[in-house]
Amino acid sequence: MTDKHWQSAFKIVERLREAGFEAVIVGGAVRDRLMGLPAHDVDVATAALPEEVKSIFPKTADVGIAHGTVMVLDPAPPVEVTTYRTEGTYTDHRRPDHVEYVTSLKEDLRRRDFTMNAIAIRGDDTLYDPFGGVEDIRRGIIRAVGNPDERFGEDALRMLRAVRFAAKTGFEIAPATKAAIARHAESICHVSVERVKMEMDKIWTSGRAGLAAQLMAETGLARHLPLMGQAFSSENLGIWQLFGEPMQPVEGWALLYRLAGEPDGNPYKLSNAEKRSVRDILDACRISLERPYSRMDAYRHPETALIAGARLANLTGKAAEQDDPGAISRMKKSLPISSLRDLAITGNDLIKWSGKKGGPWVKEWLANIEEAVVIGDLNNTREDIKGWFLNGDESEGQR
Ligand code: ATP
Ligand code: MG
């Protein structure tokens, strides 16, 4: 997010105004700007209908046309422009599948979740804040717009968003809003796993996962989400307090699995890459609990997994490996090779030097050479490896 996004958004607001349509900047970007934080995306809301937006701007993409959103590509960088709307009927505590366009900005802001997310900036840079969002930001309060019971009844994800914003900002959830979350906690199970996962990813990296865990336990949200009741039990809350700000969200999932047990399936639909990373971290964690990392451990596991694994081991048990990312990085960097491809020789060299036919022995020998190089017994040069291979043929080769 850069000033360019803001400039682009202001230009779009101006052009819509010239074409006779009210338009403002809304949503998270306004909140983040008022808090002095960098925003991710600057959104524009307008009284113009999607078709009208498309006729005003030469280059657009239909990113969310069903919800009234058109992506304006020129001026660049792209900005999402959404027609003022309310949301239709809610079934099953999920987002509605259709929307109704309205002409009043206030009506559009009314359907938004929290007062701090219901502030608009006009083209002349003045604020429109009918629900007291600025004051709530000043006081550090997350408050539902309107009646919290109704709002959480409409879309249960908002409860988790409240927790996520609390974790991101350190703000307090207003007592009436929090009490309503406790009353509606059970309905979180109707929200799609994908949406829950997105919120949790942001919670893990917020720097205040401990606060989120406590809020989820207190309000009962945790009990209605897979693994979280167990992972956020009172004896585990202290661990989440110390969890701090991890490098990547997978560390949060790894800690969740470590505390609640690895699930049989994939309840949060982690991607294959994420599953792999979580597995790597948990493997490294298990090693850390047993012994300090050996050079072979450092060689076999990705650096991020070694660091995260040592961290989790120290957080959750009596670790043998110290939680010292610098030392782990240095050990990883000091390795003479980082994969078999870095060896100065190949299997073909071994076949040539031995005069034997290829077979499973080649792979075994490569593994021996690889290990000897990694642990520092053998230099990674053709001459040294050849000597070691030919002389050690009877003795060491049989290891
Ligand atoms: P982020 O910093 O994660 O982008 P955000 O507040 O911008 O946070 P978005 O999901 O980008 O969140 O949504 C943009 C705006 O749309 C929000 O600021 C809020 O006004 C509104 N909004 C988003 N999700 C909901 C929801 N579930 N219920 C009501 N309003 C919502
Ligand atoms: Mg946003």
Image: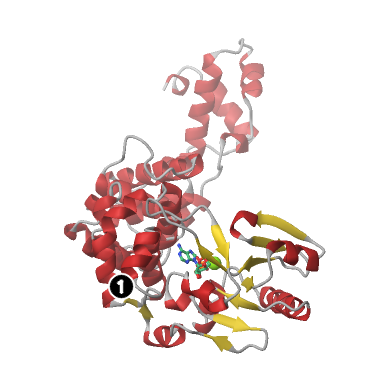
Relative side of 383 to 257, left or right: right
Q: How many marks?
A: 1
Along the line of sight, which residue is nearer the eye, 17 or 399?
Answer: 17
Ligand 2 sits in quadrant? bottom right
Where residue 357 sits, quadrant-wise, is: top right
When the figure is inspected, residue 381 is found, relative to residue 143, above or below; the finding is above
In percent of width and height, residue 136 lies at 40, 84
Judged left or right of residue 321, residue 96 is right
> Which residue is denoted by mark 1 in the rendering?
177
Rendered view: 362 above or below 80? above
Q: What residue is rendered at 44% in x and 82% in y?
A: 131
Q: Residue at x 47, y 69 (%)?
A: 111
Which of 179 and 67 lies nearest the eye of the viewer?
A: 67
Q: Nearer the viewer, residue 341 or 194?
A: 194
Question: In the rendered structure, which amino acid carries the disc numbered 1?
Answer: Thr
Question: How far from the left and from the top, in percent, is residue 285?
Answer: 33, 47
**Could you tell me residue 257's position as x and y percent?**
31, 46
Q: Which residue lies at the image location 26% right of the left edge and 43% below the top edge?
A: 261
Q: Is residue 32 above or below residue 353?
A: below
Q: Residues within 10 Å of mark 1 (few under 14, many from 20)?
A: many
Q: Is residue 248 visible?
A: yes
Indicate if the residue with disc 1 has its beta carbon within 8 Å of ligand 1. Answer: no
Tell whether 139 sits left or right of 373. left
Q: Secondary structure at mark 1?
A: helix
User: Where residue 180 sits: x, y (%)?
Assistant: 27, 68
Q: Where the C terminus falls, by quadrant?
A: top left
Q: Say if residue 288 shows up in the picture.
A: no
Quadrant occupied by the N terminus: bottom right
Residue at the right extreme? 58
